[in-house]
Image (tube, helix red, strand yellow):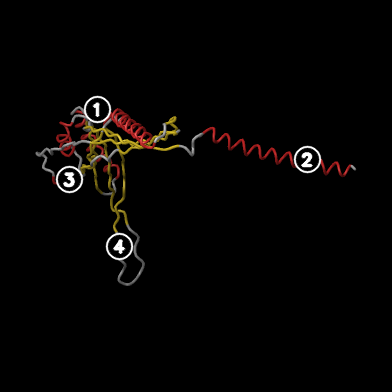
Amino acid sequence: MNEKIKNCLGITIIIILIVFAFSMVSFVKFYSKSIEPSSFRSFSTSGEGKAMAIPDMAQFTFSVITEGGKDIANLQKENTEKVNKAIEFLKTNNIEAKDIKTQNYNLTPRYQYFRPPENGGPVPPPEIVGYTVTQAVLVKIRDFEKIGDTLSGVIQNGANSVSQLFFTIDDPTNLQNQARHEAIEKAKEKAKETAKAAGFRLGKLLSIQAGGFTPIPQIYRAEALGKTTALDESTTPIIEPGSQEITVNITLTYEFK
């Protein structure tokens, strides 16, 4: 008798567990639908907004490259003096300290390599014959009338490499907001027209997805400006900033009724 009771109790417990598991599955399904009630009754529209602006800041990098023998301290001193002279020129021409940034500083060895001996013996290992010190400085220019004079001036004051001149917008937030507003309005209008043409009513807005593309600033490399080693110090290059376009894409997902 006791054995039958135990069996019945066991079966009852199993049934309760099955009912509980089924209830939990149903609850999860119901909850997921309550979170996104119209996952199977929704549609999306997209819009694109653009804002055009003239860049308000230029950037370029100048470097001082110093080669010499094994006297590292002397090389570093010579390189530092040239860099400091170029930086002092920038500050004298009203380039603020916050717009002058050391990008990198490298000390690299130069090797002499040997040919295999004629008798077929072992090749001597490379030998360090000197070092090269390179220091690069990033400069921001906010007054475009100074660009040409600044490029020429840093060369006259010690720099022997100038590269990666490009124009950008210092704070694109307002332009992005303008483009985003235009994109949303276009997406809204498209949603209304779609609903009208298809004969249904718009429900609530379910989601907003935003994406954007800002073109990479046009870069004027040293080759475009003329080799720095051959640059005529009396010639000031004329640089035009052009314009830049900021694009924002918006996708709106609506419930429809």
Q: Residue at x 29, y 65 (%)?
A: 115
Q: Quadrant of the N terminus?
A: top right
Q: In front: 97, or 122?
A: 97
Query: Which residue lies most toward the right here?
Result: 1
How far apart marks 1 and 4 lie (CA) works out to 49 Å
Helix, strand or loop at label 2? It is: helix
> Which kind of residue does numbered mark 2 sit on?
Thr
- Amino acid type of the residue that numbered disc 4 sits on in the rendered structure: Phe
Quadrant for residue 96, please give it. Answer: top left
Q: Position of residue 77 (x, y in %)?
A: 26, 39
Q: Determine which of the numbered discs, if any, sits on residue 96 in the image.
A: 1
Judging depth in this view, the residue of 38 and 234 nearest the camera is: 38
Q: Disc 1 marks which amino acid?
A: Glu
Find numbered disc 4 in the image and state the secondary structure of the residue it sits on: loop
Question: Residue tagged by mark 4?
Answer: 114
- Closer to the eye: label 3 or 1: 3
**Sequence-earlier tag: 2 or 1:** 2
Pointers 2 and 3 in contact (C-beta within 8 Å): no
Q: Which residue is mark 3?
A: 224
Q: Which residue is mark 2?
A: 12
Q: Looking at the picture, which amino acid does disc 3 mark?
A: Ala
Say which label, 3 or 1, has the lower sequence index: 1
Q: In the image shown, does 192 or 27 lie closer to the viewer?
A: 192
Q: Nearer the viewer, mark 1 or mark 4?
A: 1
